[in-house]
Image (cartoon, rainbow, N blue to C red):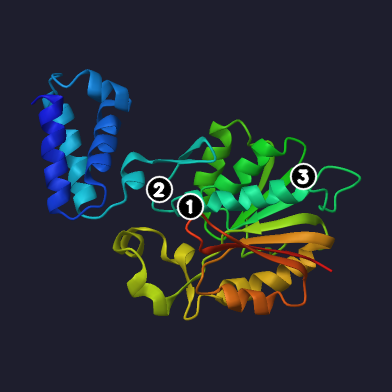
Amino acid sequence: MHLKDALSSAVDRLTAAQVGSPRMNAELLLMFTLSCDRAYLFAHPERELTVEEQTRYEEALAQRARGVPAQYITGHQEFWGMDFIVSPAVLIPRPETEHIVEAVLELTNGGRSSSPGGPAHMVDVGTGSGCIAIALAKEFPQAVIHATDISAAALEIAHANAARHQLESRIHFHQADLLQGLNPGSFDFVISNPPYVGESEEDQVQLEVRKFEPRNAVFAGPTGLEVIERLIPQAQAALKPGSWLIIEISRTIADGVKHLLSGWKQLQITNDLQSIPRIAAAQRS
């Protein structure tokens, strides 16, 4: 089968399976199958696929048609301009989470971080794939960075990603429930993309997220605030005075988060590119 015919057939198949962006998915999975880039697909429409390539492409398409996210099929996702390994053990990094890294950059460049005498100490709580911690390690070469996750399987992925980007010596990984076991009063930034979806919102969550991404990384409990309610007092204890907590949120929980952080200073809610409240930042008094 010619490459262009395989691609056309794949688009039809994914369209019939009601997969969003069927052409993009068909191209992505063919690039994965052939270990090539998009330019190659367009430059070689008459290239014959081998039987083995056709079989592998068919397997990938079957998974995608069943709802398996493309990132779990390819094992990769980009974040902050870097390539990350992902598996069903970790949440797939999303573009809106990059706003967390931007918030840290903004606060440090604005001269408002509380690290006048040495490198900043940061901790990424619920690190998952390690994408936030690794992006921060890249942006802050002098910073001391810690990352926690309750899942041993997630930490394996995070370790692998740190090693791939040659940052494993920069990040201290801990298997822990939130900030359990970390030294109090030692951090300039506590950063987290915690589970924040309420079980009452389950019907509004994409089916492939509900079916395939780790449930405990998506859903926090009935309201969506349950993990953040536990994180805030732990962050209060872990942060130095005048230091910052930065967390990813959603529109549903924005008012609840504001209430929970009412005793903190300089509370800021930042919207994402879709004008949805996405980042809450607050300074410990």
Relative height, residue 181 to residue 78 (above, below): below
In percent of width and height, residue 278 lies at 55, 62
Depth check: give the residue in front, 140 or 74: 140
Crowd tier of the residue under label 1, counting other residues whose Cα lies within 10 Å: few below 14, some 14–19, many 20 or above: some
Query: Looking at the image, which residue is at 67% across and 43% down?
Result: 171
Q: Nearer the viewer, mark 1 or mark 3?
A: 3
Instruction: Compare marks 1 and 2 and give the one earlier in the sequence.
Output: 2
Mark before the other along the chain sequence, 3 or 2: 2
Query: Does residue 24 sit above or below 272 in this rendering?
Result: above
The residue sitting at 10% across, 38% down in the picture is: 9
Q: Secondary structure at mark 1?
A: helix
Could you tell me the amino acid type at mark 2? Ser
Percent of width and height locating residue 156: 51, 46
For label 3, count other residues whose C-alpha is less than 10 Å away and answer few (under 14), some (14-19) or many (20+).
Answer: few
Marker disc for residue 153: 1
Residue 87 circle label: 2
Which label belongs to residue 109?
3
In the rendered structure, the answer to whether residue 116 lies left or right of residue 75 reads right
Residue 106: % across, % down? 71, 48
Residues at marks 1 and 2 touching, judged by CB atoms closer than 8 Å? yes
**Residue 115 point in image, percent of width and height:** 85, 49
Q: Secondary structure at mark 3?
A: helix
Cα gap from disc 1 to disc 3, whole angstroms: 35 Å
Q: CA distance from mark 1 to mark 2?
A: 9 Å
